[in-house]
Amino acid sequence: MDFKEYPDREMLALSLADRLASQLGQHLRNSETATLCVPGGTSPIQVFETLSGTDLDWDRVTVFLGDERWVDGEHKRSNGRLLRRYLLKDKAAAANYIDLYTGDPQPDDAIGALGETLAPHLPITVALLGMGNDMHTASMFPGADRLTEALANDAPSLLPIRSEGAEEPRITLTRPVLSNAFHIHVLIMGPEKREALERAQKLDPAEAPIRAFLDQATVHWAE
Ligand SMILES: O=C1O[C@H](COP(=O)(O)O)[C@@H](O)[C@H](O)[C@H]1O
């Protein structure tokens, strides 16, 4: 694991946004399109805002979330709402966005069609992951009903998933599709998350799902 510590959150946002944009730009030099997968939650707001103003051939970039909470797109807990507010604006408004929330009653109803929509955009060029204090990443929570399936080598690209730690049903990209990304970054902030990361390094992915990505990832942290 490559661990980068920043003097403050602003420096983290500037440096990480620059890194993500340069990896996407590099990929676009040899490829017609690139794919950016991002987390929801609260941590990525500053990174999104910085990235949204970055010069990039955004019309050749496809963006989607690594997970979504199964709530209406205008609900305050919607990860898509966060993305539309902070990332898909300014220069990044030109990106091609795949919304994981389809409006179906349950995420289970959406998996088939979404899997087909995502397939042409895989492998992911750059995956940015978040992590909760409970060491979940995307919506792979410790103890989640389909965590074993989501971590398996033969997992489909997406799964519906439910967990006591989550307030609503979720849809999540799975370990193989995320760990196949050319570049993986983990964004965490604050002392509790740093402690959680240290704990996760000593555990198995079944107990600490973020662990499944740490060997390949660059972790970005600021107090
Ligand atoms: O529920 C979720 O939580 C994680 C972490 O969120 P944060 O608010 O602690 O940054 C996030 O990465 C994930 O996308 C989200 O659905």
Image (cartoon, rainbow, N blue to C red):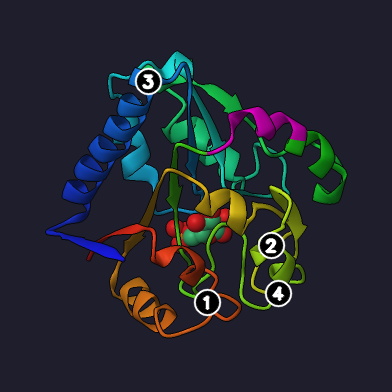
Q: Of tags 4 and 3, which is closer to the observer?
A: 3
Q: Decide whether the magenta segment is chiefly helix, strand or loop.
A: helix
| Numbered tag placed on residue 30 in the rendering | 3
Q: Is residue 21 left or right of residue 126?
A: left
Q: Amino acid at mark 4?
A: Glu
Whether residues under marks 2 and 3 lie with C-beta atoms below 8 angstroms apart, the answer is: no
- Image location (x, y in percent) of residue 34: 46, 27
Q: Is residue 169 visible?
A: no
User: Marks 2/3: CA distance?
Assistant: 31 Å
Q: Which numbered disc, 4 or 3, marks the residue that appears first in the sequence?
A: 3
User: Marks 1/3: CA distance?
Assistant: 36 Å
Whether residues under marks 1 and 3 lie with C-beta atoms below 8 angstroms apart, the answer is: no
Q: Amino acid at mark 1?
A: Ala
User: Marks 1/4: CA distance?
Assistant: 15 Å
Please report the bounds of the magenta region as a residue range: 116-123
Which residue in the protein does label 2 denote?
Answer: 150
Q: Amino acid at mark 2?
A: Ala
In the rendered image, the vertical position of residue 79 relative to residue 174, given as above or below: above
Q: Of tags 1 and 3, which is closer to the observer?
A: 3
Which residue is at the front of the view, 107 or 124? 124
Q: Which numbered disc, 2 or 4, marks the residue that appears first in the sequence?
A: 2
| Numbered tag placed on residue 208 in the rendering | 1
Q: Of tags 1 and 4, which is closer to the observer?
A: 1
User: Marks 4/3: CA distance?
Assistant: 44 Å
- SS category of the residue bearing label 3: helix
Q: Quadrant of the C terminus?
A: bottom left
Which residue in the protein does label 4 denote?
Answer: 164
User: Marks 2/1: CA distance?
Assistant: 13 Å
Q: Which numbered disc, 1 or 4, marks the residue that appears first in the sequence?
A: 4
Q: Which numbered disc, 1 or 3, marks the residue that appears first in the sequence?
A: 3
- SS category of the residue bearing label 4: loop
